Image: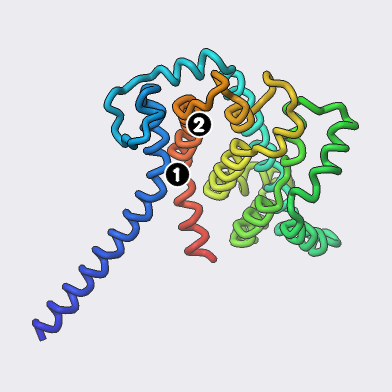
Amino acid sequence: MSTTSSKQLGSQRLRTAGLYVALYGAAFLFVVPYLYMLSTSLKTAQFAFSQQPYWIPPEVSFEWYLIVLREAPMVQWLVNTFIIAATTTLLVVILDSMIAFSLTKLDWPGKRVVFTVIIASFMVPIYANMVPLFTIISDFGLVNSPLAVILPFSAMPIGVFLFTQFFRDLPDSVIEAAKLDGFNTFQIYARIVLPLMKPAIAALSLYTFVYTWNQFLWPLIVLQGESSFTLPVGIVTMQPTQVFQPGAEMAGTLLAAAPLFIVFLILQEHLVNAVQMQGTTG
């Protein structure tokens, strides 16, 4: 009996060790591009163009960061991107949560049809809407304005879908108790429902912020002045010289990606809570 138990315990430990090795190996593969990006950005020009790869730079230099900050309006692009991403995230959270609340906790005719249309919009590729969207933006005179990027993405179907799943798990007794206490519909939404949905709000905020921050094609179409570029567009058009400079490109990309790491570190606890909540209630 003890021999069998020891074999089972050893087998379980071996499977656990193999699982951790696989997970850490997969995580390392995701980190490799960032390590290469950091390594290249710290190399001097001599080693950046060397045919022999150097993961650890023989000489560490911050010259590429200085060149990027001096030759390109990185700060202006950073401010533009942050304003667009933060405003879009705020609008998406407010509008999508209101729509989802009305679809799940309020009774009105046609809400099933509305929800079906919202879900069906997932099947429409964004590229199919770009020509009519640009026509509308141009008619309103918003070309080369941050609103041209913010408004088309101020309500996202994925946000409505996510909030709908969370609101359905909210007991109706909470809503009824609030009504008995004299709360109106907006007070129930703002003071009862939203505080309970912090994990869902954090998850959608992180997704929307990262998605908006990384947008390239649409900002490239509607933002036509260098001073109004976002970071993804600006980095592509950035060249300190007429010759491709990998160190400068990697330095600029690292500066563009750094804020996303900071946002993730701030919201990671709420993101984990959102996954756990959906896993236990769904």
- Residue 72 x, y percent position in the rendering: 57, 18
Q: What residue did someone put label 2 on?
A: 253
Dot label at residue 249: none
Q: Nearer the viewer, residue 235 or 218?
A: 235
Quarter of the figure that contains the N terminus: bottom left
Asked if the residues shown at circle 1 and circle 2 are in contact, with their CB atoms under 8 angstroms apart, the answer is: no
Q: Is residue 82 visible?
A: no
Quarter of the figure that contains the C terminus: bottom right
Q: Nearer the viewer, residue 52 or 3?
A: 52
Instruction: Determine whether, in the image, residue 72 is placed left or right of residue 14.
Output: right
Instruction: Determine whether, in the image, residue 123 is placed left or right of residue 230.
Output: right
Residue at image coords 54%, 24%: 243
Q: From this viewpoint, which residue is outermost toward the bottom? A: 1
Q: From this viewpoint, which residue is outermost toward the top? A: 70
SS at circle 1: helix
Instruction: Determine whether, in the image, residue 43 is placed left or right of residue 244.
Output: left
Q: What residue did someone put label 1 on?
A: 268
* Image depth: mark 1 or mark 2 in front: 2
- Residue 269 x, y percent position in the rendering: 43, 45
Q: Nearer the viewer, residue 171 or 92?
A: 92
Amino acid type, residue under disc 1 in the picture: Gln
